[in-house]
């Protein structure tokens, strides 16, 4: 979605800002963004649209960087660099800035507290921290060596470092120092002419080092594994095996339809709705009445019934009825005879 002043005001208050660089398949982008929001609800997410379609991402719940433009294939460093500069212009107060590719997903909560812990003494963190002297066979190193005569005056260092691109994290303080270290016109010119694929894996970490930054690697992040690697998609079986690992919070790569499938598998399963109780059958109602009659025959219930009768005056009425019922029936004449007995004669009478 397009950035508004309200969105900018919200963004500048985020502690963690996550940059997603993508350019195609809005359905996949929407699933990725929903995944990031679910596992990082307090983070601000910013899309850099690196493709030719200016409307890409406008139907997705993600803020779009307002100055996006098409990027060269395999060279996405300009996108993150431009966002770094823009965040300073709007006065953003973030503490961590993270870059993600279009094929990265989170697998659990707690990433921001994890950063607080492992980056307490560091300015940047990435996967597979390497240098050009010991790893001259890697693709980013070989590509940079071809243009090192152009980039060395920018960094002003004797060598350079590399990170595996997705998941690079930089503290705000080191970003300010990186922006102040270089001639921006020279950097923008080199971004326009460079042919060094995977430049983003060299540029930022080397610049952080050049500024005296304390660079580090993800814990246990020296090698590719089942959760972070190059090439084959990470599977849900991989996630299930390693999800509880204290250092693994995100996975790469998960591309296209596989990302959509993974998104559904990572979402919490809804609780089943309890089915309504079936209506009682006539036989059940009859059994219920019989059971009630049996209960009424129990002594305790009889005593309760007796108490109720005493309370409401029913016992005396019942006694009267019983007493009358015990007396034999007599005719009216018999009653009169009994009532008016003749007096006995006396001697005088």
Image (spheres, rainbow, N blue to C red):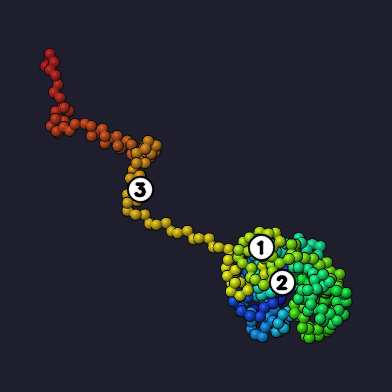
Residue sitting at the far left? 349
| Residue 99 appears in the figure | yes
Q: Nearer the viewer, residue 314 or 44?
A: 44
State the separation of the CA atoms marked 1 and 2.
18 Å
Q: Which residue is mark 3?
A: 288
Q: Residue at x 13, y 15 (%)?
A: 346
Tell me how many marks there are.
3
From the image, state whether disc 1 or disc 3 is nearer to you.
1
Q: Which residue is mark 1?
A: 109
Q: Residue at x 73, y 79 (%)?
A: 76
306 vs 40: above or below: above
Q: Secondary structure at mark 1?
A: loop
- Residue 26 is situated, as x and y percent measured from the top left of the image, at 61, 78
Residue 221, image quadrant = bottom right
Tell me where residue 154 sits by quadrant: bottom right
Q: CA distance from mark 1 to mark 3?
A: 52 Å
């Amino acid at each position: 979605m397009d950035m508004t002043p309200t969105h900018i005001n919200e963004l500048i208050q985020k502690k963690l800002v996550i940059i997603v660089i993508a350019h195609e398949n809005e359905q996949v982008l929407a699933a990725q963004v929903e995944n990031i929001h679910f596992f990082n609800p307090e983070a601000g997410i910013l899309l850099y649209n690196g493709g030719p379609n200016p409307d890409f991402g406008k139907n997705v719940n993600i803020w779009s960087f307002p100055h996006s433009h098409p990027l060269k294939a395999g060279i996405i460093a300009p996108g993150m660099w431009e966002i770094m500069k823009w965040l300073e212009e709007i006065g953003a107060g973030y503490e961590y800035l993270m870059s993600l590719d279009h094929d990265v997903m989170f697998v659990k909560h707690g990433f921001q507290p994890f950063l607080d812990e492992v980056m307490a003494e560091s300015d940047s963190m990435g996967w597979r921290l390497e240098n050009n002297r010991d790893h001259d066979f890697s693709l980013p190193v070989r590509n940079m060596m071809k243009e090192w005569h152009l980039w060395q005056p920018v960094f002003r260092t004797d060598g350079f470092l590399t990170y595996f691109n997705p998941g690079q994290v930089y503290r705000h303080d080191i970003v300010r120092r990186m922006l102040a270290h270089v001639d921006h016109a020279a950097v923008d010119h080199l971004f326009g002419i460079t042919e060094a694929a995977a430049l983003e894996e060299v540029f930022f970490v080397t610049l952080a080092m050049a500024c005296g930054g304390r660079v580090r690697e993800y814990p246990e992040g020296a090698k590719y594994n089942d959760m972070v690697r190059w090439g084959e998609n990470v599977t849900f079986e991989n996630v299930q095996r390693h999800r509880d690992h204290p250092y693994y919070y995100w996975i790469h790569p998960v591309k296209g339809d596989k990302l959509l499938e993974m998104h559904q598998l990572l979402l919490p399963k809804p609780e089943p709705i309890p089915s309504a109780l079936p209506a009682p059958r006539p036989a059940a109602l009859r059994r219920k009445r019989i059971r009630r009659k049996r209960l009424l025959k129990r002594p305790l219930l009889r005593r309760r019934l007796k108490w109720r009768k005493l309370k409401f005056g029913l016992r005396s009425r019942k006694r009267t009825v019983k007493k009358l019922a015990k007396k034999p029936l007599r005719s009216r004449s018999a009653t009169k005879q009994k009532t008016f007995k003749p007096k006995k004669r006396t001697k005088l009478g």
